[in-house]
Image (spheres, grey):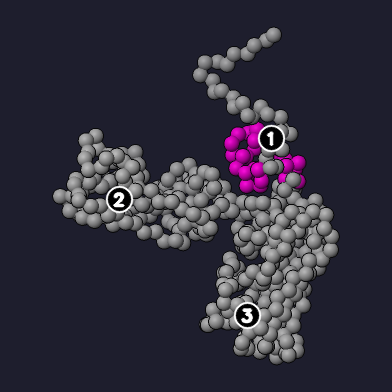
Amino acid sequence: METTVAAPGAPASCEITRLPEDLLLASFSRAGPVAACRAAAVCQAFHAASDTDALWACFLPRDLPPFADKELSPPPASKKALFMRLSDGPVLLADGLTSMCLHRETGALCYMLSARKLSIALGDSFLTPAHCRWIPVTGSRFSEAAELRHFRWLEIGGKIDSTMLSQHTTYADNIVYKVEENRWYERFANIFGASKFPKERDDGWMEAEMGEFHNDEGEYGEVSISLRKLPYVNIDLVALGIEIRPKGLLSTSIDRNRPAMWPAFHAPCHLPLLADGEVFEPLTSKKALFLRLLDGPVLLADGLTSLWFDKETGGICYKLSARKLSIAWGDNPTYWHWIPIDGFRFSEAAELQEAKWLEIRGNIDSKMLSQHTTYSAYIVYMLAIEYYGLSSPKDIC
């Protein structure tokens, strides 16, 4: 039997990279598309396994509907490229009245039915130009929307084949619309009821959930969606269509020119300005930026705040320096000293001399935080070798 001994100082091979490729593929397919992309950055073996058509076929639907001409031009060169294109933004189907995309984190199928594909009734008003007008729109996969005016009640309905949807999935259907900018709450409440509030989408339209349904396995037929509301007064709105997506997921309306995968984590749409020299080499992609911010805190332009991404969730994290906080008696040298520190993103810290009571406050703009995320706040401190007044560090809360 031949035994190979590694040379002294040679790097040890990671045992997990010796797993058979089919086992790696099985693991990645259960972890999901985002985890597969993350795994590609771990090592060469993971990178090779995470790029295979066999893996990305697991994330794609078995039967994709026919697309409109030139929607996938040029044709994606691989299953991964096809997934990235379909998760990058809606593509138009062959009927020209339906768009489809894949949710980038789960691979779930999402659809939008254009207003032209819906049945619209306006009560005692007829669909004449005085009450329903088709107007051109931009920034959407559809070229027109229905402008509805001067009606007493509204009924909008649509249908979709259940076989086009993801199995074992609970879907929510959302009406996508616009109203006049002034008095929008009153007009919205008149249509959908005061208990429902609008949500603003990335594409500038509003949406409201109409209802939900569960699509199980092996069920065939059409799913009918309808909304009927009786406003108290005449109202006007522009209806773009109905979006059908798994319940709990955010809108699939995104900028088609935005890279698909790496902005999918819970970072804000616009990162704050970084301090000069924080990123020494230009970052060529969203992935490179994401990996850099996973690596450790970077200093923001104010010099008093640092930022990084959580390695498990991609959520954005911040640390506010002592100089950015409101500290009671912080400017009084009798109670506080400002001392230099090493090994941190901040150059100084506040050293407490003595105090009968302590109050420290900080503020951060909620727009800088990850959406749909529960945050915890921590105070970061050190205790002197000799201190008094606290029975133990746990007294600080």
In this picture, residue 247 sits left or right of residue 272: right
Q: CA distance from mark 2 to mark 3?
A: 49 Å
The residue lying toward the viewer, choosing from 106 and 123, is 123
Instruction: Tell me the residue at 54%/79% (across/down).
Output: 185
Dot 3 and dot 1 residues touching (CB under 8 Å):
no
Which of disc 3 and disc 2 is earlier in sequence?
Answer: 3
Q: Nearer the viewer, mark 3 or mark 1?
A: 3
Q: Amino acid at mark 3?
A: Ile
In this picture, residue 268 sits left or right of residue 24: left
Tell me the SS state at disc 1.
helix
In the picture of the structure, the residue carrying the numbered disc 3 is 191
Residues in magenta, as a range: 31-57
Tell me the SS state at disc 3.
helix
Answer above or below: position of 364 versus 41: below
In the picture of the structure, the residue carrying the numbered disc 2 is 322
Answer above or below: position of 267 versus 180: above
Q: Position of residue 366 (x, y in %)?
A: 44, 61
Instruction: Tell me the residue at 58%/50% (across/down).
Output: 262
